[in-house]
Image (cartoon, helix red, strand yellow):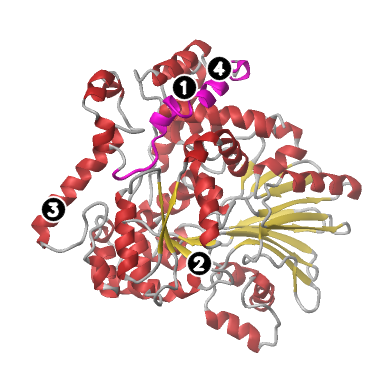
Amino acid sequence: MPGIAGIISKVEPELAREKLTSMAHAMWRESFYSMGSYANHGAGIYLTWSCLRDSFSDCLPIWNEAKSLVLFFSGENFADDEVIEALSHRGHKFDRCNASYLIHLYEERGLEDFLKSLSGFFCGVIIDFRQKVAILFNDRLGMHRVYCHEGKEAFYFSSEAKCLLRVIPDSRGLDEKSLAEYFACGGTLENRTLFKKVFLLPGGSVWRFDASGETKKSYYFQPRDWEEQPLLSKEVFFDKLLEAFNKLLPKYFASKTPVGLSLTGGLDTRMILSCWNPPARSLPCYTFDGIGGNIYDTKIAEKVAAACDQKHYVIRLEKDFFSDFDSYAEKTIQVTDGTADLCGAHEIYLNKLAREIAPVRMTGNYGGEVLRGVTTFKARLPREDLFEHDFNNLIAEGGRSLKDSENGHKVSFTAYKEIPWRHFGILSSALSQLTVRSPYLDNDLVGLAYQAPAEARSNHAVSLGIIRKGDPRLSRIRTDQGIGGEGGWITEGVLRAYYRFLFKMEYYFNDGMPQWLAKTKRIVDALDADRVFLGRHKYLFYRRWFAEELSPFIQGVIFDSRTEQRSFLNRAALRKMVYEHLSGQANLTDEISKVVAIELVHRLLLQQ
């Protein structure tokens, strides 16, 4: 995905430049990326970067007029118009459509106020020649990852772990504790990564590197800054949320390139439409779907788009996804540094098609988590016989660590742990193809969520109320969970129970099939349960795909001698696992997805 990589060092310039070149070559790139590099031998700073062409950060390096400051920025910032206007009135020259104003914001406000004014997914480096200091920073939540390695002679950092693996031989191995967390939780916890001696820069960090070689590590923002706010009444919270949402949406739709709305059948993208109220036919909308018929998301999104007089597209997984699956699986591991497993391989395929509609993708992602406390971040321990005894103990410890991390403020768990730890893999896949925006992680909205009373976060009433306030037509279209519509609370209650039943049944007959149900395959087949329950809410059927269309690929990787020799795996149980899944005697979708993903990490990232 696009980002920045760099070395801060006093080592021999030729060696540093050679390593920087290796890091640049390791960065994932597409034909629509812009690339660049910068070296300052005197300061011992070497940087390389990539970005989507014509995106917000496609203007590097960014200098002030006096050439005393330079900024390297990756990601986006959503500033109020008055902030940009004030800089213009101060006589600064910049392009309003990109990040070129940011260096002047730093120059005018100073470091602390500058960083606190930023909102979005980003990381950056400022070289302040006046103070002879280099400053590395990232966004408050750590959504734009910065992988780091502190060596004796140099500090290495990159938006992509593969850049560090290329130049740091000691990092080319998996951290056992992190690997166990990956199998238990679907990702690594805290600031750990899959790789040895590589860690993540914590969210809200600002690290200063001065000319003497000293490093000062600090935070410009921490969760407690939001946690100390008083709770609001439900009525006051509703008014403030509506005001904040209406204020921030114009910033998120401002773009040099076209914006498309990734529209679903739920509440969160509908909230965006109801408050933004775009002119007719001005906002292309699209929904992801599978081969054949339309899921509820697609059917409902078509109605929502029609009600707003917007054009709607259906982006489907086609047969070429399966015929080229090995390529998409490998790309997913390379792009995400292994943070997405095999069940995320469709993301690059679909987002590549979405880019053809609009290079900026507006989503309602994270709205349920931030506003309504929705969570799917739970430990799911794999079959014990698949792993060696000591590794099973580490997996169990990983599950307990996740449970312990839930202690404390609920919104802090959501914003600082669940979203950046669990959802980064899917996000990074999408970011490799287009710009992704979600107003639900805006500073003002997340900060306000800390003030929500319990009754506001426990149901959908506030979200549905905002939709009714913004565009009553959209509240009359039921969601994929039966929320909204007309007919009174009894009708809604019955329909919600019906949709919930179908959702649960689809989960049980899809990737979430319990083992006792998998053992009754003959009965399930006789009832034709797949036809009855699948394809209503979901278009992804990896459980079935692994056993059918993707079976040759799965067997080719797992039955390879290299896979079977991994020290943490039980070879006999590994083969048994695959045979049981392929024959329909067990549902081992999650185990297969992760084992294959980690094997591809070994082959593509560690043994490059």
| In the depicted structure, whether residue 541 falls above or below residue 355 | above
Q: Earlier in the sequence, mark 1 or mark 4?
A: 1
Residue type (three-letter) at the residue carrying disc 3: Gly
Q: Mark on residue 393?
A: 1
The secondary structure type at the circle numbered 2 is strand
Q: Earlier in the sequence, mark 3 or mark 1?
A: 1
- Foreground mark, 4 or 3, reads 4
The quarter of the displayed image where residue 314 is located: bottom left
| Disc 1 and disc 4 in contact, CB within 8 angstroms | no
For residue 527, side relative to residue 53 (left or right): left
Query: What residue sits right under mark 2 in the picture?
Result: 259
**Which region of the structure is painted magenta?**
536-564
Query: What residue sits right under mark 3 in the picture?
Result: 493
Residue drawn at point x = 69 percent, y = 79 percent: 94
- Foreground mark, 3 or 1, reads 3
Query: What residue sits right under mark 4 in the picture?
Result: 559
| Disc 4 and disc 2 in contact, CB within 8 angstroms | no
How packed mark 1 is, by other alpha carbons closer than 10 Å (few <14, some 14-19, many 20 or more), is few
Separation of residues labelled 2 and 1 (CA atoms): 47 Å
The secondary structure type at the circle numbered 3 is helix
Q: Tell me, yes or no, if residue 504 can be seen here.
A: yes
